[in-house]
Amino acid sequence: MARSQSGMTPAQMRDPNYFPGIIKGTPLGIQHVLAMFVSNVTPAIIVSGAAGFGFGSGDISNMINMIQMSMVFAGIATLIQTIGIGPMGARLPVVQGTSFAFIPIMIPIAIQFGMAALMGGIIIGGLFHFLLGTIVGRIRHWLPPLVTGLIALTMGMVSFANVEKAAWFAAPDPFHFGIEFNAAAIIGMCLMAVISAIETVGDISGITKGGAGREATNKEITGGTLADGFGTAVAGVFGALPNTSFSQNVGLISMAGVMSRHVVTIGAVFLILCGLVPKFGAAISSMPIAVLGGGVIVMFGMVAAAGISMLSDVVWDRRNMVIFAIALSVGLGLQLEPDALQHLPATLKVLMTSGLLPSAMIAIILNMVILHEPDDLEEAPDMDVVTPASKMN
């Protein structure tokens, strides 16, 4: 059988259980870490800033700790996905990391209720996410594509004082920020868990399609979602942020063509080791705010680009355009006119401030209640339907 440039046969490259060996597997595993690294630690930096212990504060030790825990529990959650524990884990090359999607909800919770309430919400939300794993296959149709520096160093902007102070090793500290169960935080995290679960389902399907040319099995989807929720709940116990699967690593699997879950396991071990060394987290915290800002611009731009890419698969008939228009208008409207929420209770204000949750819920509900147009109407020549260019050939 012919072998690729990597020395693996096509069958081996598509096999999640194949291990190419340490020499070949290590650089491939580190490649996965590099693809998700900035996206994984940036939410911790953003939330730390909102909570008052980020850049510019007198003491950034809590931010360093959150960065560390983001790496440690991204690695642990990834290990659960690749190796599996009982029914948990897709046993596929699924890379877990801190979710950007939760940021619009976490920031108002951290500001108004504090970090203890945020951690309580993350733990309960993770457990709720875990329970979703038992039914996620039945709700997949609820969320179709329609719904879901070199320079700074030379200029003297980098200070390594925090690296010098940091220890070489630190074990995870349970309940580092305390724990408090707040209704707004719990409701927000549980609602976001639904969206995160469907995202994980999509990523697992993308991995099996892109890497192995097949559909994901129910066992893989269920195990992946269980691991997603469990990883988030455990992360909350130790002061880390919610975890979810990383879509950029799905694309990397399709590009590299290597489906081995053991390669990702190597990357997960590397993440955990980095997270247990405070000097590594301190080095990340030494990043100038200007460099961070540039990275955030790219990260949020990538999130928007991913959403547009998903929408490119939508057939834009009148039904889908109405759903999209209403959800988009509500989301942008609440962002641009926050005074619209002034008469709501404090809990609802926190949940609706960003516009993300109301938009998502509106899109989900409308997608379930608005009937699809009959096929004969969709095919009528005078019907105002716009189809993606990829489907016109």
Image (spheres, rainbow, N blue to C red):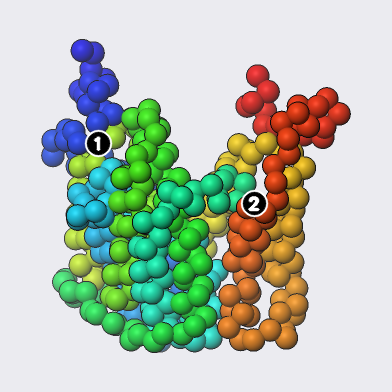
Q: Is residue 85 left or right of residue 367?
A: left
What residue appears at the point 45 percent right and 63 percent down from the top-left corner? 193
Residue 198 seen in the current view: yes
Across and down, in percent, residue 224 comes to 33, 51
Across and down, in percent, residue 74 comes to 30, 60
Residue 303's tag is none
Residue 29's place in the image compared with 42, above or below, is: above
Residue 16's tag is 1
Name the amino acid, label 1. Answer: Pro
Q: Can you tell which of label 1 and label 2 is closer to the viewer?
A: 2
Report the quarter where the C terminus lies.
Answer: top right
Residue 391's place in the image compared with 29, above or below, is: above
Q: Residue furthest top?
A: 1
Q: Is residue 104 left or right of residue 263?
A: right
C-alpha span from label 1 to label 2: 35 Å
Q: Residues within 10 Å of mark 1 (few under 14, many from 20)?
A: many
What residue appears at the point 37 percent right and 63 percent down from the top-left corner? 131
What residue appears at the point 19 percent right and 55 percent down from the top-left corner? 86
Instruction: Give whichever of discs 1 and 2 has the lower sequence position.
Output: 1
Q: Which residue is disc 2 drawn over?
A: 367
Q: Observer-nearest residue: 16 or 296?
A: 16
Q: Residues within 10 Å of mark 2 (few under 14, many from 20)?
A: many
Q: Is residue 101 left or right of residue 35?
A: right
Where disc 2 sits, the SS reads helix
Quadrant of res 285:
bottom left
Q: Observer-nearest residue: 343 or 27?
A: 343
Residue 115 seen in the current view: no
Quadrant of res 66:
bottom left
Across and down, in percent, residue 101 comes to 50, 61
What residue appears at the point 63 percent right and 27 percent down from the top-left corner? 390
Name the amino acid, label 2. Answer: Asn
